[in-house]
């Protein structure tokens, strides 16, 4: 880590989140001073102020495979020479990558004065304490989905992959607060999001750059009908959890930004997550195909859709059918090997499809095009 340029031997006030942090099973939790604005000195001896960018570096047991960080800006003031400096203001740092959306702040321990945490074997489910009763009701189904996804990877996934064995989920029904969580804006049709958390050593404070991402954080809009409906809410809570946990499961596999010229294909990202989710709810799978593909304009192309509700629904479902096509043709192990290889080397799609199903990309797309049509 970078040495602190300003001599803060200990945080002059409690660590970010205060007592709420004690509810989280951290394997690592420490602060690293990254930058400062101002010297912290004053020739006249009073009113000396410095703005300090501080990374809260942390690793949550089972959830993270590498330390990740949340970036704050502390405004530190010393009233007179020899007095203890105090923090007068804390907020998200504007300095991480020069974009406020990449500071992963606020986390739930910043938003909630009283954070409710349900800790289970494979999941941490978090909300504001005023929603504790609802969170306690949803948490067993969140845990069941976590167990399903982890067991699928354990039984059929490639060996020697660093994947999490637990997930952190924040349930937030207030859309304004939901949009603020982790500094990751949402779109209108979004029900949940897996927020990638870069490894703290990926270009900051270490030469170790073997993983771009150390983990992910899940946030879900718990105001939506999948949480509030009188019937089937249990299956719907599991469905969104299966989907978002699938994203989080493979996030540490994603290659560094500098690898190749291609990014991970959207149909692989969403197709994998939907394939994991819908394998546990075949009734819902049939409903989505009927509603999102049947009667829609299907051009036989692998989806690369825009962010609007109609195209997102169809894009997710046709992506699911692409991934299901791979799994039915070659098996679960081949499908999980394919997603692993593609996340690691997104510029090698043609060879990865040949390995998975014996067809290059163009041939695969042509063969798959008949598959959605046969399920319409």
Image: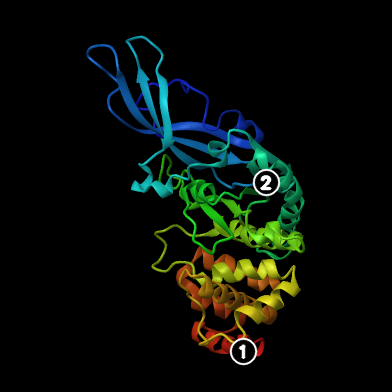
Rendered position, 32 above or below 363: above
x, y percentage for residue 335?
64, 72
Image vertical order of residue 96 relative to residue 289, above or below: above
For image coordinates 46% across by 44% down, the residue present is 201
Residue bearing the label numbered 2: 125
Secondary structure of the residue carrying tag 1 is helix
Between marks 2 and 1, how big is the CA–CA gap? 39 Å
- Mark 1 crowdedness (10 Å alpha carbons): few <14, some 14-19, many ≥20: few
Quadrant of the rendered structure where residue 223 is? bottom right
Q: Position of residue 163 (x, y in %)?
A: 62, 54
Q: In the image, residue 211 lies at what x, y percent?
A: 50, 52
Q: Residues within 10 Å of mark 2 (few under 14, many from 20)?
A: many
Q: Position of residue 53 (x, y in %)?
A: 38, 34
Comparing 192 with 162, the one in front is 192
Residue 147 in sight: yes
| Residue located beneath label 1 in the image | 373
């Amino acid at each position: 880590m970078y040495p602190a340029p300003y001599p803060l031997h200990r945080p002059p006030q409690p660590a970010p989140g205060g007592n709420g942090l004690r509810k989280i099973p951290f394997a690592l939790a420490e602060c690293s001073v990254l930058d400062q604005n101002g010297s912290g000195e004053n020739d006249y001896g009073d009113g000396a102020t410095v703005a300090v960018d501080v990374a809260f570096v942390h690793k949550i047991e089972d959830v993270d495979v590498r330390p990740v960080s949340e970036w704050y800006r502390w405004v530190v003031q010393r009233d007179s020479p020899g007095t203890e400096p105090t923090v007068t203001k804390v907020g998200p740092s504007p300095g991480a990558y020069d974009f406020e959306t990449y500071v992963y702040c606020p986390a739930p321990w910043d938003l909630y004065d009283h954070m409710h945490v349900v800790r289970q074997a494979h999941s941490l489910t978090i909300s504001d304490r005023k929603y504790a009763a609802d969170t306690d009701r949803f948490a067993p189904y969140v845990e069941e989905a976590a167990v399903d996804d982890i067991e699928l990877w354990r039984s059929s996934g490639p060996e020697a992959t660093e994947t999490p064995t637990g997930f952190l989920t924040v349930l937030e029904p207030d859309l304004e607060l939901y949009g603020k969580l982790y500094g990751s804006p949402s779109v209108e049709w979004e029900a949940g999001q897996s927020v990638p958390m870069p490894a703290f050593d990926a270009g900051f404070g270490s030469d170790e750059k073997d993983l771009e991402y150390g983990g992910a954080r899940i946030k879900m809009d718990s105001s939506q009908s999948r949480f509030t409906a009188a019937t089937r809410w249990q299956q719907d809570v599991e469905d969104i959890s299966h989907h978002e946990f699938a994203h989080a499961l493979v996030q540490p596999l994603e290659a560094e930004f500098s690898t190749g010229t291609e990014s991970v294909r959207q149909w692989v990202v969403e197709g994998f997550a939907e394939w994991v989710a819908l394998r546990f709810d075949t009734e819902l799978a049939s409903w989505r195909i009927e509603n999102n593909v049947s009667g829609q304009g299907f051009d036989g192309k692998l989806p690369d859709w825009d962010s609007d509700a109609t195209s997102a629904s169809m894009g997710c479902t046709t992506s699911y059918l692409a991934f299901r096509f791979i799994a039915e043709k070659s098996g679960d192990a081949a499908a999980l090997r394919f997603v692993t290889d593609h996340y690691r080397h997104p510029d090698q799609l043609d060879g990865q499809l040949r390995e998975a199903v014996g067809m290059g990309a163009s041939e695969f797309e042509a063969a798959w095009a008949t598959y959605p049509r046969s399920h319409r």
